[in-house]
Image: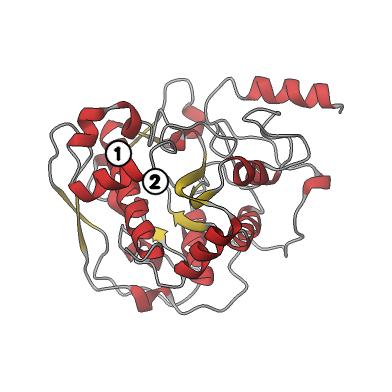
Amino acid sequence: MNRRSILLLLACTLIAACQPQPALPATATPTQTPARIIPTPRVAAAPLSTRLESTKTVTIRPATATPATQTFEASTSTAASETPLSNEWKNLPVLPEPSESIREIYQKGRTLGNDPTAFSIFGDCQSRPVEFFGVFETDPLLVESLPAELRETVEYFNGSFNRESSTSQDGTTPGALLWDQWHRGQYGCSFGETPVDCELRIHRPAFVIIQIGTHFESRNTEYLRKIIAQLIEEGVVPILASKADNRELDDRINRDMALLADEFNLPFWNFWAALTNLPDRGLYVMDGREEQGAVYLNEEAREIHRYTGLQALNIVWRVAAEQ
């Protein structure tokens, strides 16, 4: 298939938001992975249960013009299994508890010329500005309603919230982030560089929020591991996040994201746990896209998404910058 045909296929695919996308061509395969149903990190890490509390309550103030306080149970008292295939990640707190080790990554990025006031997002359609963070630059009344500390965070990172990028597009998968034609030559990217390479070159972020997996693939975790390793090598602090849905039916995407956070000792934003008290977890089936199932966030879930995401960014930034 020539380049013109590939571009035509991509254009047709992107007409509908968040549609599953083609896997990487064989020539773009970054790693060869063992045959396994649920991939797990290669490095033995301390069990996630060592970071759990029997019951942890997180107070979340949705970002609305009139903030209201809601309380969510971020964990349960059920003892979690120690096995890699368990769902103990569900008991982790909503907000990250980053270790001081991220300061070394952050300081390396400063020496390499990364912009300390910039962050990027690696995700699909629900991470694009119109659905996620864009309101923090387009709705001044909403920003005024935030606590003072979060208003400071919004001001500090102004320019990153409402920004379209090659790494946050409809239907993005981890493999797509490593495909040098996924960006279609847009966003200032060049053919021959991956969306990850392009974003790091153009925006020079100090932090990257990785929330991806609704459109999963067989090498999901191997691709993510490669992306995380590249970010750390280039002095960018990754913030790994769980997603709201369970389209894969066995929770392996969120499980592996938590395991990767453990493997690399990185902050984990457990967005999944913030939706515990919402009917149907704040998810619905979009008309005309019934085959995708309940993967879209309703308005209440979107408010929690952007608010807890801002809280996570605020926490990680302040620990990394030693504020």
Say which label, 1 or 2, has the lower sequence index: 2
Mark carried by residue 244? 2
In front of the other: 178 or 31: 178
Residue 226 to residue 13: above or below: below
> Looking at the image, which residue is at 75% across and 54% down?
30
Q: Is residue 165 left or right of residue 27?
A: left
Estimate the x, y position of residue 57 in percent, counting from the top left.
19, 61
Q: Secondary structure at mark 1?
A: helix
Residues 96 and 106: in front is 106
**Which residue position holds label 1?**
301
**Color scheme of the displayed model:** secondary structure
Whether residue 40 is visible to the viewer of this picture, yes or no, is: yes
Q: Quadrant of the N terminus?
A: top right
Residue type highlighted by circle 2: Ala
Residue 305 in sight in this render: no
How many residues crowd mark 1 within 10 Å: few (<14), some (14–19), many (20+)?
Answer: many
Which mark, by number, is residue 89?
none
